[in-house]
Image (cartoon, rainbow, N blue to C red):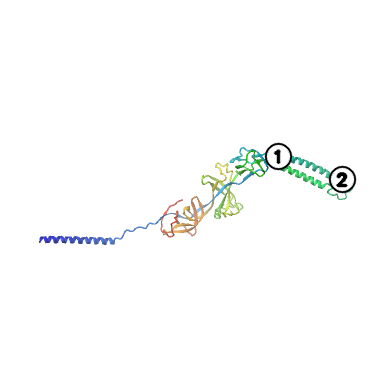
C-alpha cells in the first residue's frame, strides 16, 4: 500500500509540474503578444542650411581685364640709312623720358640734301627778285611808250614770268623744309615717357623708311577695359553729371595670384557693344603705374571691384548654395525640399546676393545642394552660417 501511494504522489507531482510549466509558458506568450515591438525612429538626411532675412547691401561690381598702355607704338624709321648710334638704354625693359635720344641714322646724305635745297632756294630767291625788277621795269616802259590808255597784255607786263618765279621760290622753300625734316628724322627721339618692349635693330643695321626699330609703351598711363553686363551697368553708382556719369569713380584692381592691389579711376565708358561678348566696357586708368611703390606692369590680368548702389531686400548666401543662376533649394516649414526661383543681383568674394522671385521674408536655404536631392524630399535641417 505504501509503495502504491509513493508512485501516485510522484505521478501527481510530475503532472503538476507539467501543468505549471504550461501555464507559465502560456502567460509569457500572452505577455509577448500584448507588448508592442520598440519603435524605430526614421532617419532623414541632414542638410546644412542658412537662415536668411532680407536686408540692405551695397552692391559690388566685379569684372576682369588686361592692363595695357594707352599708347602702344611701333617705332619706325622715316628715312633710310645705317644705324650709327643706339642709346645705352636701348634694351627691353628700359625706360626713356619724352624727348630723350634713342638712336641715330647716318646723317651725311641728308645734310647734303639740305645744302642742295638751300642752294636751290637761294637761286629761286634771286630769280624772283630779278623777275620782280623786270616786271616793274616793263610796267614803267609801257607807261612811257605813249600807249598807257590801251590795255597791256600780261605777257608784256611779265606777270606770268613773275608768277612762275614766285612758284619756284615757294617750291624751293618747301624743299628746304623737307630736307630739314629728313635730317631731323635721322635722330629718333622718344615721343613720350616710353618703355622698350622689343628691340629689333643694332648699331650697324641698315634700315629703310618704314622699318620697325622697336615697340614702345607709354608708361605715363595704363588702362584696363572692363566688360560689364547690362545688369552690372544698372548696379553702378549714379552721378549728377550726365556727360560723364561715371567720372571719378574709384576702381580697386587686384592680382588674384600675387594678391597685389592698385587703385584706379574710371576714365570713360564705351558707347558700343562688343560683337562677340555683347557687353559694353568701362575703362579704368592708373597714372604712372611703373613708378608706384608697388608697380603695375602691362599685360597683367587683374580683377576689378567697383562699389555700386545700396540695394534693399537682399539675401546673402554662400555661392555654393546656387543650383544654377536661377534656383536654390529651400527647406520649408514641413522640412521638405522645394526649389526656390531667385534672381542673382551681384556676387562678392564667395558670397552671392539674391532676391527671391516670389515674395518671401524668411527662409532656410541649403548651403551645399547635392545632385541626389528631390522635390518634397524629407530632410533634417541643420543651421550652419558659412559666411
Find out whether the residues at labels 2 and 1 contact each other: C-beta distance under 8 Å. Answer: no
Q: Judge left or right: residue 103 versus residue 373.
A: right
Q: Earlier in the sequence, mark 2 or mark 1?
A: 1
Where residue 258 sits: x, y (%)?
A: 51, 44
Residue 188: x, y in percent? 65, 41
Q: How many marks?
A: 2
356, above or below 203, in the image: below
Residue 318 in view of the camera: no
Q: Residue furthest left?
A: 1
Toward the right, the furthest residue is: 146
Disc marking residue 94: none
Mark 2–mark 1 Cα distance, whole angstroms, equals 48 Å
Q: Which residue is mark 1?
A: 109
Give the position of the N terminus as an image quadrant: bottom left
The residue where tag 2 is placed is 141
Q: Is disc 2 placed on a helix, strand or loop?
A: helix
Q: Residues within 10 Å of mark 2 (few under 14, many from 20)?
A: some
Q: How many residues crowd around disc 1 within 10 Å: few (fewer than 14), some, or many (20 or more)?
A: few
Horizontal and vertical percent for residue 226? 56, 50
Q: Compared to 256, does 46 lie above or below?
A: below
The residue shown at (70%, 39%) is 109
Q: Nearer the viewer, mark 2 or mark 1?
A: 1
The x and y percentages for residue 104 are 66, 39
Q: Is any atom of residue 180 visible in this view?
A: yes
User: Image point 20% across, 61% down: which residue?
Assistant: 18
Side of 25 where 319 appears, left or right: right
In depth, the one of 136 and 79 nearer the eye is 79
Q: Horizontally, is 303 left or right of 381 in the view?
A: right
Amino acid at each position: 500500500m505504501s509503495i502504491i501511494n509513493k508512485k501516485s504522489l510522484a505521478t501527481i507531482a510530475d503532472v503538476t509540474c507539467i501543468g505549471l510549466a504550461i501555464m507559465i509558458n502560456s502567460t509569457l506568450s500572452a505577455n509577448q503578444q500584448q507588448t508592442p515591438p520598440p519603435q524605430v525612429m526614421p532617419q532623414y538626411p541632414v542638410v546644412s542650411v542658412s537662415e536668411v532675412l532680407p536686408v540692405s547691401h551695397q552692391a559690388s561690381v566685379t569684372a576682369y581685364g588686361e592692363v595695357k598702355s594707352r599708347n602702344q607704338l611701333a617705332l619706325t624709321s622715316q628715312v633710310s640709312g645705317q644705324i650709327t648710334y643706339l642709346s645705352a638704354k636701348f634694351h627691353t625693359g628700359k625706360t626713356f623720358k619724352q624727348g630723350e635720344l634713342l638712336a641715330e641714322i647716318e646723317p651725311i646724305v641728308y645734310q647734303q640734301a639740305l645744302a642742295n635745297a638751300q642752294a636751290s632756294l637761294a637761286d629761286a630767291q634771286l630769280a624772283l627778285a630779278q623777275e620782280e625788277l623786270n616786271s616793274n621795269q616793263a610796267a614803267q616802259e609801257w607807261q612811257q611808250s605813249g600807249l598807257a590808255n590801251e590795255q597791256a597784255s600780261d605777257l608784256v607786263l611779265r606777270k606770268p614770268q613773275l608768277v612762275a618765279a614766285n612758284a619756284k621760290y615757294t617750291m624751293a622753300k618747301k624743299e628746304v623744309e623737307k630736307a630739314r625734316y629728313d635730317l631731323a628724322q635721322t635722330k629718333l627721339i622718344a615721343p613720350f615717357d616710353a618703355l622698350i618692349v622689343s628691340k629689333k635693330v643694332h648699331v650697324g643695321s641698315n634700315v629703310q623708311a618704314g622699318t620697325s626699330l622697336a615697340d614702345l609703351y607709354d608708361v605715363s598711363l595704363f588702362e584696363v577695359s572692363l566688360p560689364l553686363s547690362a545688369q552690372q551697368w544698372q548696379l553702378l553708382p549714379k552721378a549728377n553729371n550726365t556727360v560723364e556719369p561715371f567720372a571719378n569713380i574709384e576702381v580697386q584692381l587686384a592680382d588674384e595670384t600675387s594678391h597685389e592691389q592698385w587703385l584706379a579711376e574710371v576714365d570713360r565708358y564705351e558707347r558700343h557693344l562688343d560683337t562677340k561678348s555683347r557687353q559694353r566696357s568701362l575703362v579704368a586708368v592708373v597714372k604712372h603705374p611703373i613708378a608706384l611703390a608697388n608697380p603695375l606692369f602691362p599685360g597683367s590680368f587683374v580683377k576689378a571691384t567697383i562699389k555700386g548702389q545700396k540695394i534693399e531686400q537682399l539675401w546673402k548666401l554662400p555661392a555654393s548654395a546656387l543650383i544654377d543662376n536661377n534656383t536654390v533649394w529651400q527647406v520649408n516649414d514641413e522640412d521638405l525640399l522645394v526649389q526656390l526661383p531667385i534672381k542673382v543681383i551681384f556676387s562678392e568674394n564667395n558670397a552671392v546676393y539674391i532676391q527671391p522671385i516670389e515674395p518671401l521674408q524668411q527662409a532656410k536655404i541649403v548651403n551645399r545642394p547635392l545632385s541626389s536631392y528631390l522635390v518634397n524630399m524629407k530632410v533634417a535641417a541643420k543651421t550652419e552660417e558659412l559666411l
